[in-house]
Image (cartoon, rainbow, N blue to C red):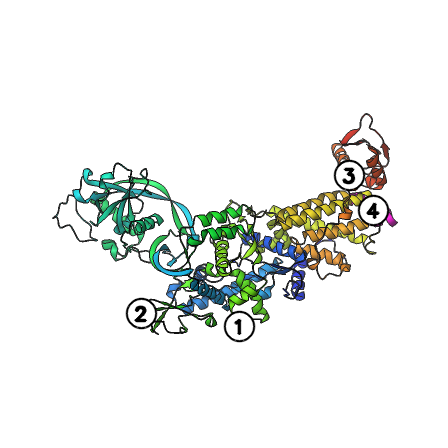
């Protein structure tokens, strides 16, 4: 049929998407004898529509899957969707205009499942449009039965090892989402605030204008004190005053040394609290004396524990002051602050106010400032395992290497065990029941999994004999499931193939060849969550890393330089619109132009360059197609120096590009291939050989045709991981005789050492120098490149002169010189082009 005059990217991409699916081209075959390469693909969260930032990182990973497949590996490339937990809940609430707590649990879960299924179908269609070579038979979701079963097995296994425990303890709490969260879900945010300086009384010197009996706890007092009897304390959280349990000062602060061991009186509440010395107090901050409330921040927790202070559970889970707030009970934090500050002022207990800035911890999902509540939660032990988890991270190969430091910094600075329970609705239930008689936990049997304890009976009575057990109503943190994504992905094949479905999960996991997986591609912002948690789980379950290599991607950036996130809605254009405007290959080209680990702005100019590359490939292929109409020449054709130089350079290119891809430097691989294609191949070699192609015949033409065919075939293969559609279209039109079903299942090029020819490369460099000099001359004379020249005289060392003389037809072809002359040495007027090479030009 032949290549059409113009490349129709849209038609070609639709055609190859359908053809690859029909051929089952990317379906995993466990019987394939080639070595395995298993990819733990990040399951995108069902919490909004895909944006160009997703495209940026996911395409990079997909290009690597294509490379390793062509490199000779049996690539296991499943794809999943993270559709359980808080992110999906919040998306469904926003999409449907509901709140989970206003519906029955069953109704809301059904709604989440319905929305998730629809969104995931759209996601799959979009990834296919981008040419993703995943095995879509292996698609999974983190709420499907298999994922729930594996997540619950993980819980049972860690619990029985003593690595999971339930505790009533202070933990970060989001009052907006009304759930506990883990340390990894906290971000920092700057905000304006006010330092309020409050007047605490000192117990031994207090003066009251009422009787010595004081006043009822929780009621605003009317005592009056003068400056000599007040202890000034600066705070940004006056609303927590009802929960003040101590005042702390630095042990070396002379101002307060005499007060240590005495008591202070909490203003408005009249409660005595101890004045305690602690070296963590900063004497230079505020007044140098601070109040400890249960709880304002992690420092309060540390002081509460260190000094065995009482606990006043002031805040409710909904973010309002509880009964311990006294007259302020029922108010929100903001309302309580306003009222308490006003009451302090009225009673002369507010000594000052100063505007300030502070960094606060917020929930990364909803951006709400976090509180700390004492609640009963499930925890995975991680603080005791820091050395082992650091060692596990060091056993993994990180690309780029400096991203390992982010992992190590996170592990080294962990301050909490991993809280995995959430007080939400849509997630994986804990397979456990609680005994009200003795407090013991009764676990489900593995044969029950997946199980919902709220609707299923426990497998047995408690060991104490009590059969009336209370089901655990919490659900797992979404990362508790995502952290076993290597196991979910690895065992997905068993489910699809109907193999070993009844076997114990641990037995299957230890038997599979797919663990540890070879590659984990992911973004840098979730090293602290997805990478860390997966390493924790794999280390605890199997004593090994979940994968051998991690490839970290950067973020796509909006025009203002901010990372694109679904929650921000700051993607300036949809991926679908970009594909329609430029093509899937062009969008992939942009994504793979960003180096591993680097952020990159959305740049349609780069996408247009991808379009130009595809069109130039098409134009070059059309030229070469015409030369191959009577078949590809035999490998015995007598090559010219220019042909040999091209093929020698090509072998070196193959070596560089292969090494770049193997080092996950896909951008460097793309750049090297593109430069070779535009500069060496199109701008120079094609111009050198046009005379031989169109004016000569026989061996001279065959040599050029052979070099063209070999080079174009290789370039197409080197570009195929990034530009899969145009590479396939050209390959199938020109090289169908290779007998391959697809360029993507053909062998990756191997550098032929026999074709590396330093002598030919010297001749080629001389040809490049001559070509460049003539082009510069014509430009300076305002002549077109096709303008004829009367005569070129070339002076060169003997070897190069003989090589150039043998390529005289190529020199005349590119320079349009009517006459060529060669000299041993240069005369006056010659321009030196390099060591041992000179040229003079006559118009």
Label 2: which secondary element: loop
| CA distance separating discs 4 and 1 | 63 Å
| Sequence-first tag of 3 and 4 | 4
Q: Does residue 337 appear in the picture of this structure?
A: no
Residue wearing tag 1: 502
Q: Which mark is residue 762?
A: 3
Residue 404 lies left or right of residue 4; in this view the side is left
Say which residue appears at 77% left-offset and 41% top-offset: 758
| CA distance separating discs 2 and 4 | 90 Å
Q: How many marks?
A: 4
Q: Residues within 10 Å of mark 2 (few under 14, many from 20)?
A: few
The spot of residue 382 in percent (x, y) is 43, 55
The C terminus sits in image quarter:
top right
| Sequence-first tag of 3 and 2 | 2
The spot of residue 407 in percent (x, y) is 49, 49
| Sequence-first tag of 1 and 3 | 1
| CA distance separating discs 3 and 2 | 89 Å
**Residue 551 drawn above or below residue 801:** below
Q: Residues within 10 Å of mark 1 (few under 14, many from 20)?
A: few
Residue closer to the observer: 406 or 576: 406
| Sequence-first tag of 4 and 1 | 1
Q: Of all residues shown, which one is farthest toward the top? A: 828
Residue wearing tag 2: 437
Pointer 4 with pointer 1, Cβ within 8 A: no
The region drawn magenta spans 686-702
Marks 3, 2: nearer the viewer = 2
Residue wearing tag 4: 639
Q: Residues within 10 Å of mark 4 (few under 14, many from 20)?
A: many
Pointer 3 with pointer 2, Cβ within 8 A: no
| CA distance separating discs 3 and 4 | 15 Å
Kindly indicate the quadrant of the structure image that contains residue 579. bottom right
């Amino acid at each position: 049929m032949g290549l059409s005059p113009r490349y129709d990217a849209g038609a070609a991409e639709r055609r190859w998407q359908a053809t690859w699916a029909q051929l089952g081209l990317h379906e995993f075959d466990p019987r394939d004898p080639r070595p395995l390469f298993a990819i733990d693909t990040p399951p995108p969260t069902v919490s909004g529509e895909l944006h160009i930032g997703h495209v940026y990182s996911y395409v990079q990973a997909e290009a690597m899957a294509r490379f390793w497949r062509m490199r000779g590996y049996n690539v296991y490339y499943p794809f999943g969707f993270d559709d359980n937990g808080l992110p999906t809940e919040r998306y469904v609430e926003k999409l449907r205009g509901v709140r989970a707590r206003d519906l029955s649990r069953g109704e809301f879960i059904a709604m989440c499942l319905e929305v998730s299924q629809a969104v995931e179908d759209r996601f799959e269609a979009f990834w296919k449009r981008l040419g993703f070579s995943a095995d879509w038979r292996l698609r999974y979701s983190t709420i499907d039965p298999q994922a729930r079963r594996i997540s619950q097995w993980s819980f049972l296994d860690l619990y029985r090892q003593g690595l999971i425990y339930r505790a009533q303890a202070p933990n970060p709490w989001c009052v907006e989402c009304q759930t506990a969260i883990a340390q990894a879900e906290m971000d920092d945010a700057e905000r304006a605030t006010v330092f309020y300086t409050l007047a605490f009384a000192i117990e031994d010197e207090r003066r009251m204008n009422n009787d010595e009996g004081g006043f009822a706890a929780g009621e605003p007092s009317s005592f009056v004190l003068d400056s000599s009897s007040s202890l000034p304390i600066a705070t940004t959280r006056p609303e927590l005053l009802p929960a003040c349990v101590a005042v702390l000062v630095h042990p070396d602060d002379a101002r307060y040394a005499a007060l240590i061991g005495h008591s202070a009186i909490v203003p408005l509440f009249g409660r005595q609290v101890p004045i305690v010395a602690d070296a963590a107090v900063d004497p230079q901050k505020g007044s140098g004396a601070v109040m400890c409330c249960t709880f304002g921040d992690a420092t309060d927790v540390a002081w509460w524990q260190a000094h065995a202070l009482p606990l006043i559970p002031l805040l409710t889970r909904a973010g309002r002051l509880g009964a311990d707030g006294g007259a302020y009970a029922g108010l929100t934090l903001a309302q309580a602050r306003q009222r308490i500050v006003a009451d302090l002022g009225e009673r002369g207990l507010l000594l000052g106010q100063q505007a300030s800035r502070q960094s606060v911890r917020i929930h990364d999902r909803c951006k709400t400032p976090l509180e700390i509540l004492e609640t009963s939660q499930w925890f995975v032990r991680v603080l005791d395992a820091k050395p082992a988890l650091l060692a596990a991270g060091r056993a993994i190969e990180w690309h780029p290497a400096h991203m390992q430091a982010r992992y190590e910094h996170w592990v080294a600075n962990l301050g909490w065990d991993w809280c995995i329970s959430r007080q939400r609705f849509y997630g994986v239930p804990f397979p456990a029941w609680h005994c009200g008689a003795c407090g013991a936990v009764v676990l489900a049997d593995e044969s029950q999994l997946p199980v919902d304890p709220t609707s299923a009976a426990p497998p047995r009575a408690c060991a104490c004999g009590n059969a009336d057990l209370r089901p655990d109503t919490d659900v797992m943190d979404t990362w508790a499931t995502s952290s076993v994504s290597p196991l979910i992905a690895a065992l997905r094949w068993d489910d699809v193939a109907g193999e070993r479905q009844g076997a114990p999960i641990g037995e299957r996991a230890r038997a599979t060849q797919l663990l540890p997986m070879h590659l984990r591609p992911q973004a840098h912002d979730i090293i602290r969550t997805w990478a860390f948690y997966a390493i924790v789980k794999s280390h605890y379950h199997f004593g090994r890393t979940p994968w051998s290599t991690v490839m970290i991607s950067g973020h796509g950036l909006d025009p203002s330089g901010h990372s694109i996130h679904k929650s921000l809605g700051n993607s300036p254009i949809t991926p679908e619109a970009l594909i329609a405007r430029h093509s899937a290959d062009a969008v992939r080209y942009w994504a793979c132009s960003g180096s591993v680990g680097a952020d990159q702005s959305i740049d349609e100019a780069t996408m247009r360059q991808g379009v130009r590359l595809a069109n130039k490939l098409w134009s070059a292929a059309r030229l070469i197609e015409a030369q191959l109409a009577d078949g590809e020449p035999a490998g015995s054709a007598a090559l010219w120096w220019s042909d040999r130089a091209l093929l020698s350079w090509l072998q070196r290119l193959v070596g560089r590009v292969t090494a770049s891809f193997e080092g996950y430097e896909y951008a460097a691989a793309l750049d090297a291939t593109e430069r070779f294609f535009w500069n060496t191949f199109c701008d120079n070699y094609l111009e050198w050989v046009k005379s031989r192609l169109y004016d000569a015949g026989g061996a001279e033409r065959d040599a050029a045709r052979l070099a063209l065919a070999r080079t174009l075939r290789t370039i197409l293969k080197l570009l195929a991981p990034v530009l899969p559609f145009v590479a396939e279209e050209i390959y199938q039109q020109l090289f169908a005789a290779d007998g391959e079903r697809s360029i993507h299942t053909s062998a990756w090029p191997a550098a032929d050492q026999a074709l590396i020819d330093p002598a030919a490369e010297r001749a080629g460099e001389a040809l490049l120098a001559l070509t460049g000099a003539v082009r510069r001359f014509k430009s300076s004379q305002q002549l077109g490149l096709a303008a004829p020249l009367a005569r070129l005289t070339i002076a060169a060392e003997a070897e190069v002169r003989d090589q150039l003389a043998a390529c005289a037809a190529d020199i005349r072809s590119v320079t349009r010189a009517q006459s060529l002359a060669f000299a041993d040495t240069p005369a006056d007027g010659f321009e030196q082009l390099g060591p041992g090479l000179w040229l003079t030009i006559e118009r």
